[in-house]
């Protein structure tokens, strides 16, 4: 929406500590669904920073970039942090393929990747308490799953380096949107190959165990997550150090302490959609009729819009609009929360039969008129996110 930065700034001020804020952040997918450009994202965040009188530094993250054209558009707008998403090149078949199948898949990689991978065969790498053994199956599975993705990241990095020229930037590598978790050996393979190819990165987002769904708490065993991220953190320290990134990280309150503890503070928490949900919470308190209309429309759009997201909400479990008595309270219900989250693009771009925006103008007018209410909701919500990551 472009209105959340004041609340974000206030939350950072409220918690203090050594947290480096990234106030401008949106993925290409989100920009497409909201009809915003990279320049608009930067301009809106910059205005919010100016409005709040923020004097500290801040970052600008161009998230989930898939093509060189994505890089160019965000670089021109002044972004300084670039998250490369090679998910389209990850081969999830490798997770369930036998040895002969893995040999066939790995054999399709460029000869250069195959040649250098031989140096890892039967090698043991100790990353603090994490011991990684690259037997043939482990190595071939990592190669088959991530080999093409690594090539894509390296190509995107070279393009970014050339396009940026003398301008400095930071790079994140994201492999979180895959069907299966990233094993510790696969993480080590990715890091080893990226280093060999001359890629410099500051953070990496593996696919952790458990489920990171949109706008809701972690789904899974928090103890299993802590064991998993402990291994990933040891690998990040061994090959870096670099940060581990938590994508779809909003509202994962049950695992924040473990993430902070195991990464020793080298962690990047990514949130975006939860700010939209706080906007809807503000709307629900100000104009229940408008919120009811948005919620009803979101229910209609959910089955279509959910296809590009990892969510498990079910319409049958979400309250019907006619049954709701507490509209702000519905944002605490798991299914309703996910339904509202993933339909944001449809809500913001839906038009009437006359060609006018059905919700956008009314929603924006309310939030701009009651900007203080929205900022207060955001501050409260993000203080809760940030406190577990605060160091003094």
Image: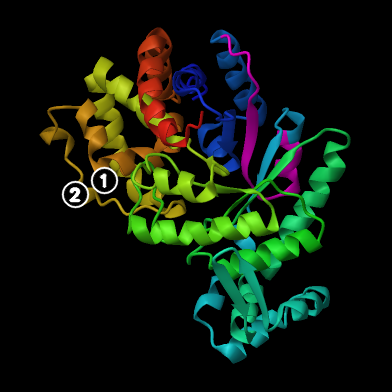
Up the image or down, 20 lies above or below 127; here it is above
Q: Position of residue 251 (x, y in %)?
A: 37, 39
Q: Counting residues from the N terminus, which is met first, the one under dot 2 or under dot 1?
A: 2
Q: Which residue is mark 1?
A: 335
Up the image or down, 229 lies above or below 389; here it is below
Residue at the image point whose x is 53% and y is 38% from the top: 30
The image quarter containing residue 184 is bottom right
The image quarter containing residue 344 is top left
Marking on residue 4:
none
Residue at the image point whose x is 66% and y is 86% from the top: 104
Verify CB contact (< 8 Å) between mark 2 and mark 1.
yes
Q: Position of residue 299 (x, y in %)?
A: 28, 42
Q: Is residue 72 magenta?
A: yes
Residue at the image point whose x is 74% and y is 76% from the top: 109
Q: Position of residue 204 (x, y in %)?
A: 61, 52
Q: Which element carries disc 1, helix, strand or loop?
A: helix
The crowding category of the residue bearing disc 2, from other C-alpha atoms within 10 Å (few below 14, some 14 to 19, many at least 20), is few
Residue at the image point whose x is 30% and y is 43% from the top: 300
Front residue of 45/235: it is 235
In the image: residue 368, left or right of residue 17: left
Residue numbers of the magenta segment: 53-74
Marking on residue 317:
2
Q: Is residue 62 magenta?
A: yes
Up the image or down, 256 lies above or below 22; here it is below
Front residue of 356/122: it is 122
Quote the CA–CA distance across marks 2 and 1. Answer: 6 Å
In the image: residue 390, left or right of residue 47: left
């Amino acid at each position: 929406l472009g209105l959340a930065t004041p609340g974000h700034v206030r939350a950072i001020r409220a918690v203090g500590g050594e947290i480096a804020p990234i106030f401008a952040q949106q993925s290409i997918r989100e920009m497409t669904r909201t009809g915003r450009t990279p320049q608009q994202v930067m301009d809106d965040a910059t205005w919010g920073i100016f409005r709040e009188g923020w004097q500290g530094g801040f970052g600008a993250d161009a998230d989930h970039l898939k093509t060189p054209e994505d890089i160019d558009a965000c670089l021109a707008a002044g972004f300084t942090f670039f998250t490369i998403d090679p998910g389209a090149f990850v081969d999830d078949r490798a997770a369930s393929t036998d040895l002969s199948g893995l040999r066939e898949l790995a054999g399709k990689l460029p000869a250069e990747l195959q040649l250098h991978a031989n140096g890892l065969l039967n090698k043991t790498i100790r990353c603090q308490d994490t011991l990684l053994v690259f037997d043939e199956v482990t190595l071939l599975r990592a190669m088959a799953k991530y080999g093409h993705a690594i090539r894509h990241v390296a190509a995107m990095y070279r393009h970014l380096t050339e396009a940026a020229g003398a301008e400095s930037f930071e790079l994140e590598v994201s492999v979180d949107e895959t069907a299966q978790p990233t094993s510790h050996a696969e993480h080590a393979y990715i890091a080893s190959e990226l280093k060999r190819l001359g890629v410099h990165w500051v953070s990496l987002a593996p696919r952790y165990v458990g489920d990171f769904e949109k706008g809701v708490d972690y789904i899974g065993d928090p103890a299993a997550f802590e064991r998993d991220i402990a291994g990933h953190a040891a690998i990040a320290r061994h090959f870096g150090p670099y940060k581990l990134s938590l994508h779809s990280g909003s509202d994962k309150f049950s695992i924040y302490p473990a993430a902070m503890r195991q990464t020793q503070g080298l962690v990047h928490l990514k949130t975006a959609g939860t700010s939209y949900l706080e906007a809807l919470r503000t709307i629900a308190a100000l104009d229940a009729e408008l919120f009811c209309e948005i919620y009803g429309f979101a229910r209609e759009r959910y089955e279509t819009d959910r296809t590009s997201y990892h969510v498990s909400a079910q319409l049958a479990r979400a309250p019907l609009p006619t049954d709701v008595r507490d509209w702000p309270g519905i944002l605490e219900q798991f299914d309703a929360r996910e339904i509202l989250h993933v339909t944001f693009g449809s809500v913001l771009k839906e038009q009437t039969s006359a060609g006018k925006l059905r919700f956008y103008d009314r929603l924006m007018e309310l939030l701009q008129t009651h900007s203080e209410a929205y900022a207060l909701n955001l501050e409260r919500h993000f203080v809760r996110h940030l406190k577990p990551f605060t160091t003094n």
